[in-house]
Every structure is written in C-alpha cells, then in structure tokens.
Image (cartoon, grey):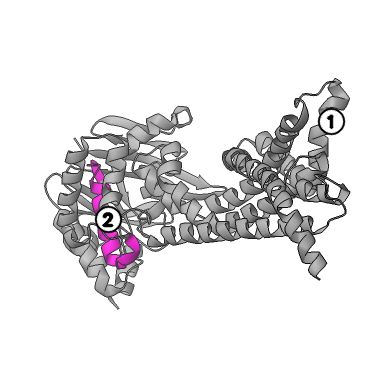
Amino acid sequence: MKEAIKIFTEQFPVVFSALNIGFLQTLKLFFTTLLCAIPLGLIISFGSMSKFKPLSAFTKVIVWIIRGSPLMIQLLIVYFFPGLVLHKNIWGMGEAGRFMAATVAFTLNYACYFSEIYRGGIQSVPVGQQEAGKVLGLSGTQIFFKITLLQMIKRIVPPMSNEIITLVKDTSLARIIALQEIIWAGQAFMKGSKGISGAIWPLFFTGIYYLAFSGFLTVLFGKIEKKLDYFKN
Amino acid sequence: MALLEVKNIHKKFGKTEVLRGIDFSLEKGEVLSIIGSSGSGKTTLLRCLNFLETPETGTISVGNKVLFDGESAKKLSDDEIREKRLHFGLVFQSFNLFPQYSVLENVTLAPAVLKKDTNEEIKKNALELIERVGLSDKANNYPCELSGGQQQRVAIARALALKPDILCFDEPTSALDPELTGEVLNVIKSLKSSDSTMIVVTHEMEFAKNVSDKVIFMADGVIIEQGTSEDVFDNPKSERVKAFLSKIKK
C-alpha cells in the first residue's frame, strides 16, 4: 500500500500536466463543434422544414445517414476518405490536420441532431404566434427572430443540454484518428510515456475531468432555464 | 363611397367550399357584426380580409383601392401582402400575445420593427393605448400574469398601435368567462367613434344588437341577411335568421 501511494505521488505531477494538455484539446474540439454545429443545425432544420420538396427530402436523407451511422465511422471516413480518393491529405499535417477532420465530423454529426431538436422546438410554437406576427405586418424573418426564436429556445434547453453533455463525452471518439485529446493522453501512460508505462490509473483519472466539466454544464443549463422562467409558453 | 368593399369572395379548403360568394360594404366609422352558427364561414371571411387565407375569386377594396383580386392573387409578393394587410388589424379569439414580451413591448414590437415612428413616439402612443384599454398599471407585466380579459385588452391595444383602417375581431370573447367578457366588450364599445371602423365576429347577440351599425347573418358560406341591427334583430326576413334568433332568446 505504501509502495502504491509512493508511486502515485511520484507519477501524479507528470500525468496531471499531460492530462491537462489533453483536456485542453478536448475542450477545443468541444467548443469549436458547438460554435459550428449550433448555427449549422438551424440551417439544416430549415432545410428539413422547407416547402420545396426536393430540398426537404434531401435534408432528411442526410440527417438519416448521419444519425443512422456511428460517429466513430464518420470520423474515420472524414479523415481518410479524401486521401483515398484525391490521393492527397486535404486536412493538413499532424495534430492540426486531425483536429480539422475531427471538427468537421463532429460538427456534421451534432448539427443533424440539433436540427431535429430545433425542428421540434419551432413546430411546437403555436401557429397563432406566427399569425399574430403576420397580421402586424412582420416578415417571415422578423417573425422568426423577434417572436419564434426565444420561445423555441425556451423549449429546447432541456433536450439541448442533454445533447451537449453527450458531446463532452463523445469527443473521446476522436481518439480513433489519434487526436491528442484527454483519453489519448491517458492511454499514453499504458504504452509508456515520460518514463511511465503500464499505468492504467491515468486513464481512469480522465473520468474526473469529464465529470467536473459536465457538472459545470449542468449548472449552466440550470441557470439558463431559470433565466427563461419569466415567461410561460 | 364605402371604405371597404368586398365582392364575390369564394374560398375552398380542399373540396369544401367555405365561402360561396360574399358581398358587402362598410362605411368609415361603422361597426359591423357578423353573426351565425359555427362553421358558417365567419372566421374564414375575417382571415381572408387579413390575408391569412387567399380566396380563389373576388375582390377586396379599401378606400377605392383594390387590395385583393382573385385574378392576380398568385402574383402578389410577400412584401406586397404585408403592405396591404396593414389596412386591417385582427384581434384573435385566443389573444396570441407574445409571451416573452411585457404588455408594453407587445404593443410597441410591430411599430418598432417596422420603424413606423421614432422610438419615443411609439412608446408614448403605446402607453396611451394601454391606458385606453385600462391597463396602465400592468404595462410592465408579462402576459402570463394577466387574466384572459386583460390579455385580450392588450391584444386590442397591440392591433390599434398600427392604426389600421379597419379593425377586425374574431370572436374576441369566446375564450373568456362571462365576467371577463363584459370588460372586453366594454373596451370594444369604447373604441366606437367616427373614425374607427370595426368588424366583429361574435356570438354575443346583445353586444351585436346594441353596438353595431350593420349586422350580417351568415350560414353555409353565404350571407343570408344583412342590414341595420334593427332590420336583422327585430324584423328578420329569412326563416333561417328567425330560427337562429329564437333559439338564442330561449
């Protein structure tokens, strides 16, 4: 037991700093994905609600493919397929290239999930709200931004917080293309890195990072929900 | 010359013909009540006037200007429709206030977005309207904090804020209990003046009889009888109207 504690205290500083670097990459992937997927999801949801049938059918097929297949496979396809077909690496070299590819795959995947949540949110705003906007002479765009949007946001906060907390953990899938996120950083100590090898505890320890961050998000979403409590739909 | 002239309006939903040739006219400052049983097309007629539905045929003119013509309706752009619909205001049966905005913001929203005036003028005008419907002390409250009757009065102020030529009410008290009905009807009554023209679809016969200058009785998508409120209520010509009124009196 004493021996174990001694090893742990020796290893901890090295592991801690490596995991921090990995977690930074995790956060970078998380925030970049959100930043791109939140607006892209809105565009996709408008596509799937379009009255122009070919567009809505096309969008629905895309959403089906993306939601219907594992994100891990999508990551592999996005990263390797362009190279197989074009015989060149469109993502750029090294970690930056892997990050680009991972961001594209995650954004596409999450935008499709978001689009369905948005669609549900928009369609659950009573049609009378739109009609009230119309008879007041507002345009479709004005009605969406001034009337529908906030009511939709209020409705979608709970499902979105679900999805976003899932994204925190899904970032670990980027390990499959060797993105150096926190799982990758933890796993390195099993194979051997910085003088430590055969240690599995760093991998277990990564769980604390995920827990802490999703705890923070849970509190944040609770705050947002409360903030929107001043009106009833 | 009449302010509003409606000619030969036909409207179908799928195969069901809901309006089968509606003609009427209205002078400036008049109050018109449209009565009749449910499903007779009253609401659809109001929705056609407000461009929420597009009739297949017919014309709608306001002050000599043809706003709608079934012949060329398909060619109207969204911007043209928005422009035209501002001649009319509509108060809904279910109020449809914007829940995320305060009473004041509900009234100022459209004039501010459409840049009808300076912000100070819009606010001043809105506060006057809110006072007119008796809700000055509620200006900063949210719709969920108001009773149904109060919400409907806000909806009236909101519609008035755009100064429509003709204000339409679609069964404004049908979602209210009798106590609240009175306060809303009193507000509508108080709006009656030489320059406000109103069309009220209603089941409140007392109100229709006492307040309207003109009454239209509709059934199955056509106007069965129209005239002054005395004509329709006291000396109805058609059997249909007589039967309807006698049922209500019981």
Give the alpha-carbon distance from disc 2 to disc 1, as whole Å.
56 Å
Q: Tag 2's secondary structure?
A: helix
Amino acid type of disc 1? Answer: Phe
> Residue under circle 2?
B103
State yes or no: residue A156 in magenta.
no
User: Residue at label 1?
Assistant: A81
Q: Point out residue A85 in the picture as x, y percentages from the top left corner.
A: 86, 24
Q: Chain of mark 1?
A: A
Q: Mark 1 falls on what kind of element?
A: helix
Q: Residue at x 39, y 51 (%)?
A: B222
Q: Chain of mark 2?
A: B
Residue under the image location 14 percent in, 44 percent down: B195
Q: Quadrant of the N terminus of chain B?
A: top left
**A55 horizontally vs A197: left or right:** left
Residue B165 magenta-highlighted:
yes
> How far from the left and from the top, in percent, is residue B3?
22, 38
Start-end of magenta stretch: B143-166
Residue at 17 percent of width and 51 percent of height: B127
Residue A136 visible from this viewpoint: yes
Could you tell me if residue B207 is visible in this image? no
Q: Amino acid at mark 2?
A: Val
Magenta region, mostly helix, strand or loop? Answer: helix
Q: Label 2 crowding class (10 Å Cα cut-off): few <14, some 14-19, many 20+?
A: many
Placement of B96 over or under A142, stated as above or below? below
Q: How many marks?
A: 2
- Looking at the picture, how far across and down is residue A38, in whole percent? 58, 43
Q: Of A98 and B107, which appears nearest the observer? A: A98
In the shown orientation, is residue B50 left or right of residue A214? left
Disc 1 residue crowd, few under 14, some 14–19, many 20+, Cα 10 Å: some
Residues flagged by tags 2 and 1 on a common chain = no
